[in-house]
Structures are given as C-alpha cells and as structure tokens.
Image (spheres, rainbow, N blue to C red):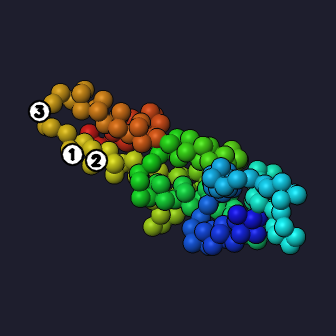
Amino acid sequence: MTKEQALERLRSRCSRAEYCSGQIAETLRRWIGRGAGRLPVASVAEGEALQLCESDIPGIISQLKAEKFIDDSRFAAAFVRDKLKFNGWGPQKILYKLRSFGIDSAIINAAISENCNNVDEGALSGRDVLEKLLVKKWRSLKEGEPLQNRKSKVIRFAAGRGFEYGEIMAALEKIIK
C-alpha cells in the first residue's frame, strides 16, 4: 500500500466515525506489519510509488489533522459523552481509556470536566449517571441480605465503573434514605 492509498482509506474511515491520532497510528502500524514496508529503491519501477513505512506515520497523521479528519479534542469530547451516557462509565474509567489512546492529559481533563460536571438542562452529569446506576443496582440485590453486604456490592460495582469513593458514598446515602 502506498502513502496516498493509505491516506485515501483513512480519509474515508475518518469521515464515517471519530478517531484519535493514536488509533490512526495503530491502524497504520497494523497495515505496515501486514504489508512489506518499503521496497528497495532499485526494485521500484519508474513511476511506481514507494510503499508505506513507519516513518510515514507522523506525516500522514499531520495531514489528516490539517484536513480536519482527526482532532483529538473533538474525539475526547465525543468519547466522554458517549461513555457517560450509553455505557455508564465514570470519570476515572474514561480517563484511563483515553490515556491508553495516547491523548494529551490537558485534552482529557478538559473533556471530562466539560462533560462529566455538566449542569445544563437536558444533559446528564456524572452524578446523575451514578445515581441511576446505583438505584438500579440497589434494586437488583436481595432484600434479605445484610445491609453492609449490599452496600459493599454497590460500592464495588460503582468503583468498577470508574466513579470515586466519595461520590459513591454520597449518592449511596441519598438512595438508602
């Protein structure tokens, strides 16, 4: 695959869904691993393009950024919104996942603070999501079970979803009362 072919495929892919630069770099590395890297210059026929290699990745990513096909801050904001709303993830789990994509900490913090601490009408905040999750989990537990066991199960559940202990306890106290 040539650099131009890779750019065309990535433009097409990025026009259908949001991707960050880390995901694009990983995709390119997979493509390079499957395909052969660069051919020796002597074996390339006249007019034939050289093959894709690892040193082409930064150039491809910068070109896609310049053409606005990828934008890490736009990706992070959409990721936070989707994971909060559809998956019920808390800020900590979202933060770790975005870090694994190689997104800058400043971008991650801005996206999380913008979306998880939302106080706009109609928008879910992290606190609202946590309370809904805890109510649903609390109702799913057996009534005859000791209160302390039920509490610990709910706390572990919410912590696994990426919420902080203090937030969990405050929401749990509201639910139990």
Q: Residue at x 53, y 52 (%)?
A: 116
Q: CA distance from mark 3 to mark 1?
A: 12 Å
Tell me which label, 3 or 2, sits earlier in the chain.
2
Secondary structure under badge 3?
A: loop
Q: Quadrant of the N terminus?
A: bottom right
**Residue 77, percent from left and from top:** 60, 59
Callout 2: few (<14), some (14-19), or many (20+) C-alpha neighbours within 10 Å?
Answer: some
Disc 3/disc 2 C-alpha distance (Å): 17 Å
Quadrant holding the C terminus:
top left
Q: Position of residue 39 (x, y in %)?
A: 79, 56
Q: Position of residue 120 (x, y in %)?
A: 52, 64
- Closer to the camera in the image, 139 or 20: 20
> Residue 75: which quarter of the image?
bottom right
Q: Dot 1, crowdedness within 10 Å: few (<14), some or many (≥20)?
A: few
Kind of residue at badge 3: Gly
As shown in the figure, which amino acid type bears the numbered disc 2? Val
- SS at mark 1? helix
Label drawn at residue 75: none
* Residues at marks 1 and 2 touching, judged by CB atoms closer than 8 Å: yes
Answer whether residue 87 is visible to the viewer in this image: yes
Instruction: Return the x and y of residue 92 as percentages of the image width and height.
Output: 52, 41
Which amino acid type is marked by label 1? Arg
Q: Which mark is residue 144?
A: 3
Residue under the image location 13 percent in, 37 percent down: 143
Other residues around mark 3 within 10 Å, as few (<14) / some (14–19) / many (≥20): few
For disc 2, the marked residue is 135
Q: Which residue is mark 1?
A: 139
In primary-sequence order, the first of circles 3 and 1 is 1
Count numbered badges in the picture: 3
x 38%, y 39%: residue:
158
